[in-house]
Amino acid sequence: MSDRTLRVTVLGSGSRGNAVLVEGSIGSVVIDAGFGVRAMARRFSQALRTPESVHDLLLTHEHVDHASGAAAASKRWNWTVHGTAATLAALDTIPGGAPERVASISATSGTSIAGFEVEHHAVPHDAADCRAFRLTDTRSGARVAIVLDCGDVPETLPAFLSHVDLLVMESNHDRAMLQQGPYPWQLKKRISGGRGHLSNDRAAALLATSAHHGLQGVLLAHLSETNNTPSHAIDTARDALRRAGWRKDLLWACAQREPIECVDALGRSGHARATQLALF
Ligand SMILES: [Zn+2]
Ligand SMILES: [Zn+2]
């Protein structure tokens, strides 16, 4: 095992479901469960992982694309569902319902989950209490930050995201594609508003202010299938990161339909292995 043991597998990301598996040197945790148990099991299998190896689920917020599978996954695999008190309370209101096995994370201090120190930061979004997370492997010290739905960038968020090995960040839409696209005006306003979603430009600017020489990789998440493309998101982020002096150039765009290759805290991806196995 590397002394920077930490591995991130985005099992799927977008408006039709999100789940991110973070594996550390002691345990594993899933961030968000926006898929039903069958789809979740299939995605684990595609990623060459098993849901039975996980005991903890951590929710960013209660929206269906992040939490609709929480209760069923908790029941099926005995996962404890962690979230802020406001997020857990809001689960009563969504399809899929509230899980029985829950644990509230502290509003003010870090929480220890599955061998990770979990810290959180409030982000503006039209949910009860949306959070960005920073997970630090307590044995290896490797660290990942995850920002999914986020309408605006609080002043203290860049500092919260700095000094991590990996960043998973929403890069939801290309502003021109959203404005010229087919969505109704009200929905365009909601998405681009201060409690909606990050555009490629805003995500790139946040990445540029959070980047540092130790950042090993960036995974762009929650891409709109209507108002964005992987190349728009990656090109925008890459340009901003290069201008900020980040030379590693290790960027991935997460997909809605299937897991992308896992990425470890040294910026190495497991793509070759997954592709090879898929041939058989
Ligand atoms: Zn979402
Ligand atoms: Zn949301």
Image (cartoon, rainbow, N blue to C red):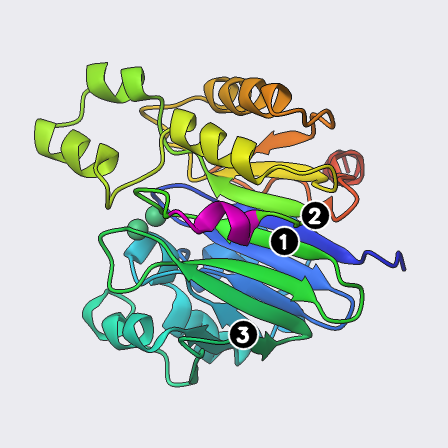
Query: Which structural element holds mark 3?
Result: loop
Categorize mark 2 by other alpha carbons within 10 Å: few (<14), some (14-19), many (20+). Answer: many
Residue under numbered circle 1: 144
Q: Which residues are magenta?
A: 155-161
Residue type pointed to by label 2: Asp
Is residue 154 at least partly visible in the picture?
A: yes
* Viewer-proximal residue among 270 and 84: 84
Residue under numbered circle 3: 110
* Dot placed on the residue nearer the N-terminal end, 1 or 2: 1
Categorize mark 3 by other alpha carbons within 10 Å: few (<14), some (14-19), many (20+). Answer: some
Confirm or deny contact between disc 1 and disc 2 (CB under 8 A).
yes
Image x and y of residue 86, in percent: 28, 73
User: Residue at point 89% right, 56% down?
Assistant: 2
Categorize mark 1 by other alpha carbons within 10 Å: few (<14), some (14-19), many (20+). Answer: many
* Viewer-proximal residue among 139 and 1: 139
Q: Main secondary structure of the magenta part?
A: helix
Q: Is mark 3 within 8 Å of ligand 2?
A: no
Question: 230 left or right of 267?
Answer: left
Real-space Cα separation, disc 2 to disc 3, in angstroms = 19 Å
* Quarter placement of the C terminus: top right
* Dot placed on the residue nearer the N-terminal end, 2 or 3: 3
Query: Which structural element holds mark 1?
Result: strand
Is residue 33 at least partly visible in the picture?
A: no
Residue type pointed to by label 1: Val
* Quarter placement of the N terminus: bottom right
